[in-house]
Amino acid sequence: PEHAEIESLTKDHTQLRDLLVAAQTEESDCAREQTKAEQDVDQVRQRAARDQQRLDSGAVTSPKDLENLQREIASLAKRQGDLEDVVLEVMERRESAQERVAELTERVGSVQGRLDDAAARRDSAVGELDAEAASVTKEREVIAASVPADLLKLYDKLREQQGGVGAAKLYQRSCQGCRQELAITELSEIRSAAPDTVVRCENCRRILVRTADSGL
């Protein structure tokens, strides 16, 4: 189950990472836009300061020039106000983008934590399964060594043909491999067979394992 969980979390993580990159890009764009807007405001402010200094110094005496200078100062003041509004608007968008980046960063971290946890659980489960498989393999080797070679060969062949099950328990007159009840004549033959005789199911051809519950 950890594989499916990891696949789902990886998909969520990828989507969130894409959204985070988009938010970071937007924040970066806003930062550059804000810097440019602030530089524009500073340039207008400096020019207005120079014009005001000229006006205050009394160096301009011509009425027409004074009027033009005052008009320019007023125009610069309006321009500065408009640019400052632009700065504020960009700052608001940048703040919104920063909040989005913070939110997505937290979500990405949360999903990454869950992903790491699922991966650790998967690795632990795989380790346990590998250890169990190694133990069962050794156990099988010991048992297989006590089985006649021709019978082991037959069992392996049937196991390959029958989806991994080469022998089945005979329980209450039914083969537990194919779940079919054996015919009376077949049961009679099995009943009369010696204990060490290899008997097989007529339906699925698996080797039948006889026990006290076979119903013979």
Image (tube, rainbow, N blue to C red):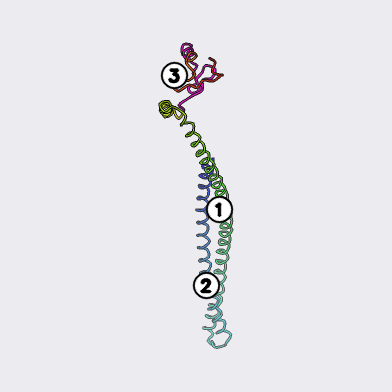
Q: Is residue 164 magenta?
A: no
Give the residue type that dot 2 points to: Gln
Reading the chain from its start, which is encountered first: label 3 or label 1?
1
Residue 141 vs residue 53, the one in the foreground: 141
* Rendered residue at 45%/30% (across/down): 164
**For the residues carrying marks 3 and 1, which lies nearer the camera in this image?**
3
Per the model, the C-alpha gap separating discs 3 and 2 is 90 Å
Give the amino acid type for the residue marked by disc 3 in the picture.
Asn
Instruction: Identify which residue, 187 or 122, lies in the foreground.
Output: 187
Q: Residues within 10 Å of mark 1 (few under 14, many from 20)?
A: many
Give residue 105's position: percent from left, percent from top.
Answer: 56, 56
Categorize mark 3 by other alpha carbons within 10 Å: few (<14), some (14-19), many (20+): some
Image: 109 above or below 2: below
Earlier along the polypeptide chain: callout 1 or callout 2?
Answer: 2
Give the mark nearest the N terminus, 3 or 2.
2
Q: Quadrant of the N terminus?
A: top right
Q: Which element carries disc 3, helix, strand or loop?
A: loop
Residue at which label 3 appears:
203
- Which numbered disc, 3 or 2, marks the residue closer to the eye? 3
User: What residue sits right under mark 2 in the picture?
Assistant: 39
Residue indicated by mark 1: 108
Looking at numbered disc 1 in the image, what kind of residue is underneath it? Val
Pinpoint residue 47: horizontal percent, then vertical percent: 53, 78
Q: Which residues are magenta?
A: 165-189
- Secondary structure of residue under mark 1: helix
